[in-house]
Image (spheres, rainbow, N blue to C red):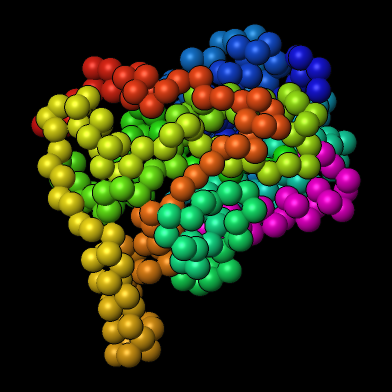
Amino acid sequence: MSPAVRLCITGASGFLGRHVVAEALKRGHEVWAVVRPAAGLSHVNWLEDPAVHIVRADLRRPEGLAEAISGCDAVLHLAAAVGGELYTQLAGTVVGTENLLKAMQSAGIRRLIAVSSFSVYGYIGKWSHSTLSETSPLETRLDERDDYCLTKVLQERLVREVSGREGWALTVVRPGVIYGRDHLWTACLGAELGERTWIRIGAWAKVPLTYVENCADAILLCAEREEAIGETFNIVDDRCPSHRGYIRLLRRRISPRPRVIPVSWTLMRLVCRCAWISNQLFFDGEGKLPSVLVPARMHARCKPLRYTNKRLRKTLGWSPRYSLEEALDRSTRDMELPA
C-alpha cells in the first residue's frame, strides 16, 4: 500500500477509533471517519483537519453507506457494540458488519482490516500459564460466555467468509486489553466495588495490555504493509504486567488511592465451580449467576496465561511506542478519583 491512502475508519469517535484516526492523519493519510448520526465529536482533536471527511452513518442501516465510503482504498473496521442486551449487540456488531461488507462490495473496496478481540478465544480449556497466541482455539462454548464474546466470534466468522468468497485482502487484528486515560480498569483484574474499592483476583496472572496509542500504531501498520494481508495478529505490548504489578503502578498515580482486596485465583476458581454446580443441581442451570461466578467467563477474565506479540514483531517489525510506565504517566496526568 502506498504511503498516503484513503482510509475509511468505522467507530471513529470511540476510544480506540479516535486514536486510529489521529495516527492515520499523522502518517499523511486521508480519512473517511464513520461515526454514529448522533455522536458528539467535541472530544476529538482532528475535527477541523482538512484531511478528515466526517461520515455520519448508522451501520445497522445499509441505505447510502456504499456511496458514503466510495473512493476509499481500505476499510479499518473498528465499530462494535460493547454493551446492551443481546439483540442490541447483534445489531451493532454483526448486522452492522454485514451491511458494511455489502457496501464494500458495491463500492469496489477490496482491502479490509477487521478489528476483533481477545474475547474470541476459548479460555476454560487452556492450561494455566500456557501461551495464548494467534493459533489458540476460538471459543466454542458460546452459551457460557457473554454477549460480547458471541457477537465478536460471529463478526470474525462473517468477515472471513465474505473476504474469502470475494477474494479480498483481509487482515484480522485482535487487541488485548486496550487502556489509556479514562480506561485504566479492566475486568481482567477482578471486580470493582464502587470507585474506591477493587477486588483483585489473582496476583501473578498477566494482564494482556496494549496502550491505545501503541494499538493504533499497530492497526495502521497493518493497513500500510502488504505483508499483513492474509494474517491474523494479536496486539499486546511488551512484558505484560501481573495483576498485582499493574494495580501497584496504577495506585501510585491516582489519588485518593483505591483500597485493594486480594482474592486468590485458586479460591475464585473453586467458588465459581461450586456456584456453577449448584446452579445445575438446584435450578437446572436456569439461575442467573453474576458474571464473576460463571466459570467460562472467569477463566476468560482472570486465568493466569502468557501472551505474545512475536508474530506482529516478526512480520511487520512493530514494537510498542510507549512503555507501560510512560503510558500510565500519560494516562493519569492530573487525574483524581471523584471525592
Q: Where the N terminus falls, by quadrant?
A: top right
Against 200, residue 229 (above or below) is above
Q: Residue at x 82, y 39 (%)?
A: 169
User: In the image, residue 86 lies at what x, y percent?
Assistant: 50, 62
Residue 57 lies in the magenta-colored region: no
Magenta span: predominant SS is helix
Magenta region: 147-170
Q: Looking at the image, can residue 67 be seen? A: no
13 on left or right of 297? right
User: In the image, residue 53 lies at what x, y percent?
Assistant: 66, 20
Q: Looking at the image, can residue 49 be seen? A: yes
User: In the image, residue 124 lies at what x, y percent?
Assistant: 46, 66
Q: Residue at x 75, y 21 (%)?
A: 6
Question: How many numbered dots are placed on residues in this image?
Answer: 0
212 on left or right of 90? left
User: In the image, residue 180 lies at what x, y percent?
Assistant: 39, 29
328 on left or right of 73? left
Against 295, residue 31 (above or below) is above
- Quarter occupied by residue 120: bottom right
- Quarter occupied by residue 30: top right
327 or 15: nearer the viewer: 327
Q: Residue at x 46, y 71 (%)?
A: 144
331 or 273: nearer the viewer: 273
Against 104, residue 222 (above or below) is above
Against 76, residue 287 (above or below) is below
Residue 169 lies in the magenta-colored region: yes
Q: Where the C terminus falls, by quadrant?
A: top left
Q: Residue at x 25, y 31 (%)?
A: 250
